[in-house]
């Protein structure tokens, strides 16, 4: 997993277990944090058990988020850590706390006094920024895995999406009070965005055509949509028409490699992280209603030179791994299978009854033919049968015509 984000004059990259921050404008020492060397959880019985056969987590960074002011950064990793960083004169570690379950998404509220973290079990926890050692507080929960979490621009609502195609809008101060549900999707909801240009809009992407990421420019006018393993980016715009904003398609950008992540900087330039060692980053700007690549900027060269040594240590087979691969639900058509088996069972039973009936008739014919020989019929009836009309043939013919019982009754009278 790899992500990028712009924080003021800094740009962040997460690759594997490392979080790297590079200054865009100046040649400054980059900030590097490695989760594999971070402190482990103390007195964890599960960690003791897993240490016998291997590590309890891979320490790979799942996601990170930047606060609205750009002064705070938080990340979650595969070992259930929540790590907080702050920037005073330079970036430094602030705290490390532990999640109950592995996290999937996180966001700062607008006041920047708490971090909301969603996990795989469907719960959302609130972690205090002002008290960096305080444990998380359970805020709300879903019945399925939460894939994305965000907050409204007025800090009034928490918006969450899950694997069961639902988007839930809850009051932030009292999350048990649900404002509404958005039920327009037919697959898992993978991405959420409240554009900075209008607090009344909510953009969401689902797994029908997997939307990995939705981001907007700082003024909220330009929106970029990234798809899973597709080497294109779709742009939209929020246009003002007749005192009403409309969401309209703008253009489509083709890329030489599949994008892994993207973000806008304060100058409305789009930074795109590529799945390539040669072309790690590209910058695009809007010129005459189309997005053009700026391949030779000083900022791009400076940032690429810092990121590339860390990027090359990351295995090519793991950096492009999608976290949405196993989220599609597998449906089983049990009714069709049941009906097919039932029809087959009925046909077999019907065939079996036919065979039993046929065998029963054959046994009855053979028994009657053996019981009444030609001598018995001559002695009891006084009539000598001819060759053309033998007793066996007459008895068999009578049975086939349904007259076997009559013959047996006549023979019984003669015997008496």
Image (cartoon, rainbow, N blue to C red):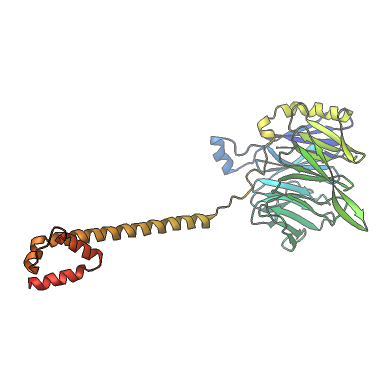
Residue 73: % across, % down: 79, 42
Q: Nearer the viewer, residue 200 or 209?
A: 209
Q: Left or right: 101 with respect to 237?
A: left
The quarter in which the C terminus is drawn is bottom left
How many numbered marks have been drawn onto this rendered protein structure?
0
Question: What residue is rendered at 50% in x and 54% in y?
Answer: 337
The quarter in which the N terminus is drawn is top right
Question: Is residue 300 in sight in this rendering?
Answer: yes
Residue 68: % across, % down: 84, 46
In the image, is residue 350 above or below residue 216? below
Question: Is residue 367 in sight in this rendering?
Answer: no
In the image, is residue 292 above or below residue 144? above
Q: Left or right: 55 with respect to 249?
A: left
Q: Left or right: 116 with respect to 267?
A: left
Residue 143: % across, % down: 64, 57
Q: Nearer the viewer, residue 348 or 168?
A: 348
Question: What residue is rendered at 87% in x and 27% in y?
Answer: 296
Question: What residue is rendered at 18% in x and 63% in y?
Answer: 395
Question: What residue is rendered at 71% in x and 55% in y?
Answer: 185
Q: Left or right: 52 with respect to 91?
A: left
Residue 313: % across, % down: 70, 27
């Amino acid at each position: 997993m790899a992500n990028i984000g712009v924080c003021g004059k800094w740009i962040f990259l997460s690759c594997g277990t490392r979080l790297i921050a590079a200054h865009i404008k100046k040649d400054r020492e980059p900030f590097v944090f490695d989760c594999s060397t971070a402190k482990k959880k103390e007195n964890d019985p599960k960690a003791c058990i897993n240490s016998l056969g291997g590590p309890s987590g891979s320490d790979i960074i799942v996601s990170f988020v930047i606060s609205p002011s750009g002064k705070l950064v938080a990340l979650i990793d595969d070992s259930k850590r929540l790590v907080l960083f702050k920037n005073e004169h330079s970036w430094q570690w602030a705290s490390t706390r532990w999640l109950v379950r592995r996290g999937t998404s996180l966001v700062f509220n607008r006041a920047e006094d708490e971090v909301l973290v969603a996990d795989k079990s469907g719960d959302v926890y609130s972690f205090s920024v002002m008290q960096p050692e305080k444990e998380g507080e359970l805020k709300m929960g879903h019945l399925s895995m939460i894939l994305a979490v965000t907050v409204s621009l007025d800090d009034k609502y928490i918006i969450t999406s899950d694997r069961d195609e639902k988007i839930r809008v809850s009051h932030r101060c009292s999350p048990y009070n649900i404002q509404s549900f958005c039920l327009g999707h037919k697959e898992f909801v993978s991405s959420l965005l409240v554009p900075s240009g209008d607090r009344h809009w909510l953009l969401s992407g689902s797994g029908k055509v997997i939307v990995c990421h939705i981001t907007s420019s700082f003024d909220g006018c330009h929106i970029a949509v990234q798809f899973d393993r597709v080497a294109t980016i779709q742009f939209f715009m929020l246009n003002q028409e007749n005192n009403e904003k409309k969401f309209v398609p703008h253009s489509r950008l083709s890329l030489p490699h599949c994008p892994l992540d993207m973000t806008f900087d304060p100058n409305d330039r789009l930074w795109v992280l590529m799945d390539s060692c040669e072309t790690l980053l590209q910058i695009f700007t809007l010129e005459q209603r189309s997005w053009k690549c700026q391949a030779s900027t000083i900022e791009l060269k400076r940032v690429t030179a810092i990121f590339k040594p860390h990027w090359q240590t990351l295995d090519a087979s793991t950096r492009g791994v999608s976290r949405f691969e196993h989220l599609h639900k597998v449906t089983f058509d049990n009714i069709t299978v049941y009906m097919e088996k039932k029809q087959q069972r009925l046909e077999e039973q019907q065939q079996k009854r036919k065979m039993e009936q046929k065998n029963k008739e054959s046994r009855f014919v053979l028994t009657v033919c053996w019981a009444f020989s030609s001598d018995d019929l001559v002695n009891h009836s006084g009539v000598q049968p001819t060759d053309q009309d033998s007793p066996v043939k007459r008895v068999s013919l009578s049975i086939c015509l349904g007259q076997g019982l009559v013959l047996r009754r006549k023979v019984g009278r003669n015997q008496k």
